[in-house]
Amino acid sequence: MERKEFIKNEIKLEPENPFNYYLLALELKKEGDLGGAIEIFNNLIEQFPMYVPSYYSFACFLLEIEDDDKAKLVLQQGIDTAERAGATKALNELKQLWELNF
């Protein structure tokens, strides 16, 4: 079974686990399915807004494809979420990404 199919199967088994959606977004990005990856990242943030790792990875991806406006929004959301969650390390990484790019 290929990796993407394995991840999709895991989503069916555990639809409430944000990590599986996160992996699927990264896998789609790796395969070059940029639209699919963006769709999964957007859904991930909408359905699991407290899943902090998604913000950093999504923002980096958006910066890679030069969608700076969307990257700013994702980073702002991520910073707010990390602060609320008390995720100090993630907060520092998100702030550093902001400072390096904006």
Image (cartoon, rainbow, N blue to C red):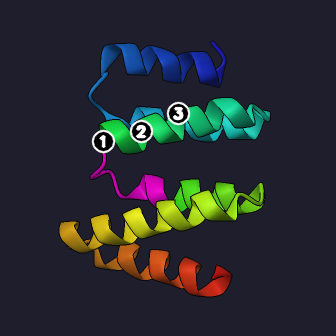
Q: Is residue 41 left or right of residue 10?
A: right
31 magenta-colored: no
Tag 3: amino acid:
Ile
**Residue 5: which quarter of the image?**
top right
50 magenta-colored: yes
The residue wearing badge 1 is: 48
**Image vertical order of residue 17 relative to residue 48, above or below:** above
Label 1 to label 3, Cα distance in Å? 11 Å
Mark 1 and mark 2 in contact (Cβ < 8 Å)? yes
**Image vertical order of residue 11 relative to residue 86, above or below:** above
For the record, the magenta segment spans: 49-55
Name the element at disc 2: helix
Q: Is residue 35 left or right of residue 78?
A: right
Tag 2: amino acid:
Leu
Q: How dense is the environment of label 1, judged by Cα within 10 Å: few (below 14), some, or many (20 and up)?
A: some
Q: Position of residue 37 (x, y in %)?
A: 63, 36
